[in-house]
Image (spheres, grey):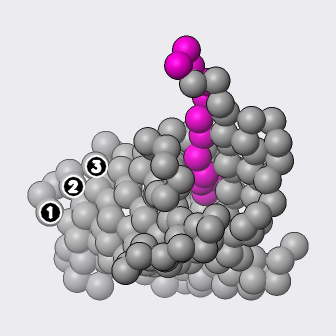
Amino acid sequence: MNKRILFTVAIFVITMMTARTQSFNGGFLAGIGAAEISGDRLEGPNKPGIYAGAFVNRYFTERSSAQMELSFVQKGSRKNPDSLDYSTYLLRLNYVELFVNYKWDFGKMFTLEVGPSLGVLIKSYEEADGFILTEPPFNATDLNGNFGLFIWLTERWQFNVRYSNSILAVRPHSQGQTYRWNRGQYNEVLSFTFHYTFL
């Protein structure tokens, strides 16, 4: 296993264990993500994927808290054939991603979140019209900005909608061209997850 992944998991496990002795809350999350790659000329999001992990958080004011989350996130892109275009495309990108988000409660049922995340690529697969592609390669890491909304369903259960976008390109365009801030291809994910908190 990649050393960066082991280090990230170790830090998260230590944090979870420390949470038991301090005023931290922890729990699990699971759901789906709808992903696309900006710059691939395909309209999206068009690639469903698994989104699952664990989290710890701590309130430092009555309404403000910080949350750290470690999740497995499937990203990528997809194109299925249709009556006008028989071409196919499939891109699978599997990441282990560490999130650090600031959360702010407003009202009794809603919480906003914003913050960065760092994903480590553990597997990639790309195919076009039945041919496996290997170039250009993807970067080993993916730095993202995230914005989301929690809806409190019960004291323990929350539903989260989150939008994530790469801050840095995950790989260059196939011809290496760039234009201003467009330095290559970027991951985009709209996720829908349920969060369960241990009390």
Tags 3 and 2 in contact by the CB under 8 Å rule? yes
- Percent of width and height locating residue 181: 38, 78
In the image as oriented, which residue stretches furthest toward the top?
Answer: 83
Instruction: Point out the stretch of residues depicted in magenta.
Output: 73-84
- Label 1 belongs to which residue? 106
Residue 20 appears in the rendering: no
Look at 47% across and 70% down and name the residue there.
166
- Percent of width and height locating residue 168: 50, 78
Magenta highlight on residue 78: yes
In the image, residue 190 above or below residue 113: above
Determine whether the residue tagged by mark 1 lies in a helix, strand or loop: strand
Q: How many marks?
A: 3
Structural crowding at the residue carrying mark 2, measured as other residues with C-alpha within 10 Å and reported as few (<14), some (14–19) or many (≥20): some
- Percent of width and height locating residue 129: 74, 35
Closer to the camera in the image, 174 or 115: 174
- Percent of width and height locating residue 53: 60, 58
Q: CA distance from mark 3 to mark 2?
A: 5 Å
In the image as oriented, which residue stretches furthest toward the left?
Answer: 107
**Numbered label attached to residue 196:** none
Tags 1 and 3 in contact by the CB under 8 Å rule? no
